[in-house]
Image (cartoon, rainbow, N blue to C red):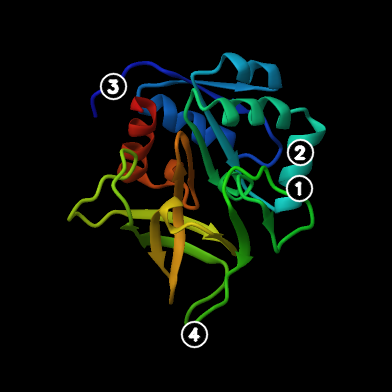
Amino acid sequence: MEKTTKFTVTIPALPISNLGAVANMVRKCGGEAIVTKEPLALLSAERVIIAGVGAFDAGMRALGEEGWIEPLQHLANEGSIPILGICLGMQLMCRSSEEGRLPGLGWFEADVKRIIAQSHSLKVPHMGWNTLTVEKQNFLLSQSIEERRFYFVHSYHVVCDDAHDVLATTNYGVALTAAISRNRLYGTQFHPEKSHRFGMDLIKKFLEI
């Protein structure tokens, strides 16, 4: 893969994060990854990735207790740089979650709900490889006849008020939201850092936005 312009991606060093894999994927795609424990470093960032695994309330507590919410809200309101939330990071961009009691960041008019298995053959969590259906024209996940597979592991899914915020869905008995976008805010329920060449393509495009 050709290397892209070396944009720097700032990644908050949260205890809920899969930091190493995400940073390595950014570097493989030609970007520079900075994992930081300093929330104010976000104010000079060119790109931000919120990478998260685990429970919703634990994620929001980590953001609040370590001082990340104010600079993140500033960046989201300003809209000057792209921000990508991965897995729990995407869910934290929403208003609330059935998994917890704390409010989310509220960047999307959306709530996080538990996956209800549609048959005995479908287990929760939704874990493993699945394909996407791209729901709207966008730069991050271009519509293509090629089948693209991404790696998922989640028990909760995002439900948007406005269907226009849904970037892509995946089928797990019913259509589940797999990616969301609004302006320069993006979220993926799947893990691009674990999704090989298709994940690399997505991160490369995130660097090029």
Viewer-side residue, 100 vs 14? 100
CA separation, marks 1 and 3?
A: 36 Å
Specify the quadrant of the image occupied by residue 70. Answer: top right
Question: As displayed, is residue 178 above or below residue 53?
Answer: below
Q: Disc 3 residue type? A: Lys
In the rendered image, which residue does mark 1 sit on?
A: 58
Which label's residue is closer to the chain start, 1 or 4?
A: 1
Q: Nearer the viewer, mark 1 or mark 3?
A: 1
Residue 104: horizontal and vertical position, in percent? 69, 47
Q: Separation of disc 2 and disc 1 at Cα?
A: 6 Å
Identity, as a three-letter code, of the amino acid under mark 1: Ala
Sequence-wise, which precedes: disc 3 or disc 2?
A: 3
Tag 2 residue: 62
Q: Using the image, determine if residue 68 lies above or below residue 117.
A: above
Disc 1 secondary structure class: helix
Q: Earlier in the sequence, mark 3 or mark 4?
A: 3
Callout 4, which amino acid? Ser
Element type at mark 3? loop
Which residue is label 3 attached to?
3
Helix, strand or loop under label 2? helix
